[in-house]
Image (cartoon, grey):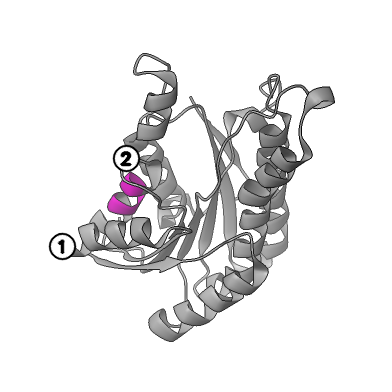
Amino acid sequence: MAPLSTVLLTGVGAEGQVGEVVAQAFADQGASLILVDRTRDHVDARAAALTARGHSARGYACDLTNADDVASLVEQVRRNHGDKLKSLVHMAGGFAMSGPVAESAIDVWNRQIAINLTTAYLTARAFLPMLRADRGAIVFFASEAALPGKTGSNRAAYAVAKTGVATLMRSIAAEERKNGVRANAVAPTSIRTAANVSAMGDDAHYIEREQVAQVVTFLCSDAASAITGELLPLT
């Protein structure tokens, strides 16, 4: 597989999370990595670990729910990495149970929409010009909860947010086809991350982080050039 040039990954997060393995997978293919997370210490640690192994990686802290912060991030990226972006992988987000709709709290609803859907919208909107310049690809992280019949109970806010991510992806895929930009999303079941294992135990059903990384890097590669507008279940 050919090197993937400049790749921006959001939600790289703490050690033991899915972003750590996805970043390593792109680095192993020769990509120059732009790592973004809300927490400066986390993103700097991920970048340092990659550069210590001889890879190209630079970390940026950004509140992706804030349009002004995202605009500032774009300017930093342009200044330090140029005007072209080959791939954008949006992993930023988070999960919380919201309880039955009739008893749910509006702050949980707003938070789930903000960290899962608003971040996806603001990031994609901001970086699409750079993706057009390199006929690039976007991969969003939806969820099994966004698949038909999989919403379940007590998690409406999360399911609605992730369903919105899938709809956003399809809109971008349709709008940007003429510009050579592809957009797809993965819909994984629970991923074996440190946080999930801590919350649900080691014996729950998980998809492995490495399996997720294989699918994401494929969707960003030239081998997937005919694939756009697809929501891929990972079970």
User: Please, is residue 62 above or below residue 133 in the view?
Assistant: above
> What kind of element bears circle 2?
loop
- Is residue 129 found left or right of 18 in the rendered image? right
Residue 83 seen anywhere in this rendered image of the structure:
no
* Main secondary structure found in the magenta portion: helix
Residue 16's spot in the image, x, y percent?
A: 32, 40
Q: Which three-letter amino acid code belongs to the residue tagged 2?
A: Gly
Q: Residue furthest right?
A: 102
Which residue does the numbered mark 1 point to in the structure image? 52
- Is residue 68 found left or right of 23 in the rendered image? right
Residue 153's spot in the image, x, y percent?
A: 70, 19
Q: Which residues are magenta?
A: 20-24
Q: Residue at x 58, y 48 (%)?
A: 184
How far apart marks 2 and 1 lie (CA) works out to 18 Å
Q: Residue at x 41, y 23 (%)?
A: 206
Residue 149's spot in the image, x, y percent?
A: 70, 20
User: Please, is residue 9 above or below residue 186 in the view?
Assistant: below
Q: Mark 1 packing: few (<14 Cα in 10 Å), some, or many (20+)?
A: few
Residue 18's spot in the image, x, y percent?
A: 39, 42
Tag count: 2
Within the image, what quadrant is residue 81 found in?
bottom left
User: Please, is residue 146 above or below residue 150 in the view?
Assistant: below
Within the image, what quadrant is residue 104 found in?
top right
Which residue does the numbered mark 2 point to in the structure image? 16
> What kind of element bears circle 1?
helix
